[in-house]
Image (cartoon, helix red, strand yellow):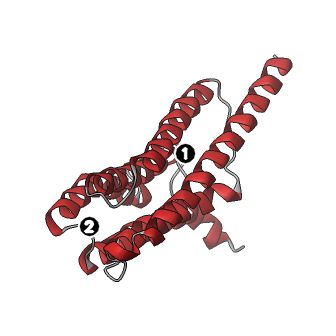
Amino acid sequence: MTRTQRQTRQTFGPSAIATPANALTVLRLLAAPAFAFFIVVLGPRSWWLWTIWIVLASSDGLDGHLARRLGTTSSGAFLDPLADKFLVLGALGVLVGEHVFSPIPVALIAFREIAMSVFRTRVSRLEISIPARNLAKWKTIAQDFSIGCAFFPPFHASAVIIPQTLLWIATALTLYTGLEYLIDGRRLMARSNLLK
């Protein structure tokens, strides 16, 4: 790695707030309620919604790339997963209201995401960082993919079983990764208590 590359990676320190990655994350947060509104207005299956969702889902990788390139921040570490949850849970909630998805898997996903947010906050107060496992990224991809399929016009009412099945797969991954995160967190908390 050249000196210029190292300087580029350290453009922003951990305490920075006004960063390009954070700006994109805030835009994603603001887009969540607007997108939910468009689902109601346009109906659940629309090429416009499908295209916009692909862009929104892809933006998660873009702000992550910007953060790694310009410097990760504490605010970004908090805001990025929050934006993911707002987008996913907002879209899932409206799709339940539009009778595309069953409320059971959506409720399970919402419970896991809220519970993990509470647990993450508790752990962070103890200054413990729990690294995310690779399967957690696949969980996010599975959630995004199932939602994208719900907007895909060729999957009309007679093919609703496809996004429903994908959602149950995403639900299983969501619950499993939540259990992994909980176990890892409790292990690190126990280790921290032993060191004190």
Q: Is residue 191 left or right of residue 90?
A: right
Give the x, y percent position of residue 109.
49, 46
Q: Which residue is mark 1?
A: 14
Kindly report which numbered mark, 2 or 1, lies closer to the viewer in this rendering.
2
Up the image or down, 172 lies above or below 125; here it is below
- Residue 46: which quarter of the image? bottom left
Farthest residue, direction left? 41
Q: Is residue 188 left or right of residue 74?
A: right
Q: Residue at x 37, y 78 (%)?
A: 155
One can see residue 167 in this view = yes
The mark that comes first in sequence, 2 or 1, is 1
Q: Secondary structure at mark 1?
A: loop
Q: Which is nearer the eye, 194 or 119?
A: 119
Tell me, for residue 44, which label it has, or none: 2
One can see residue 62 in this view = no
Which amino acid type is marked by label 1? Pro
Category of crowding for the residue at label 2, using alpha-carbon neighbours closer than 10 angstroms: few (below 14), some (14–19), many (at least 20): many
Q: Which is nearer the eye, 166 or 84?
A: 166
Mark count? 2
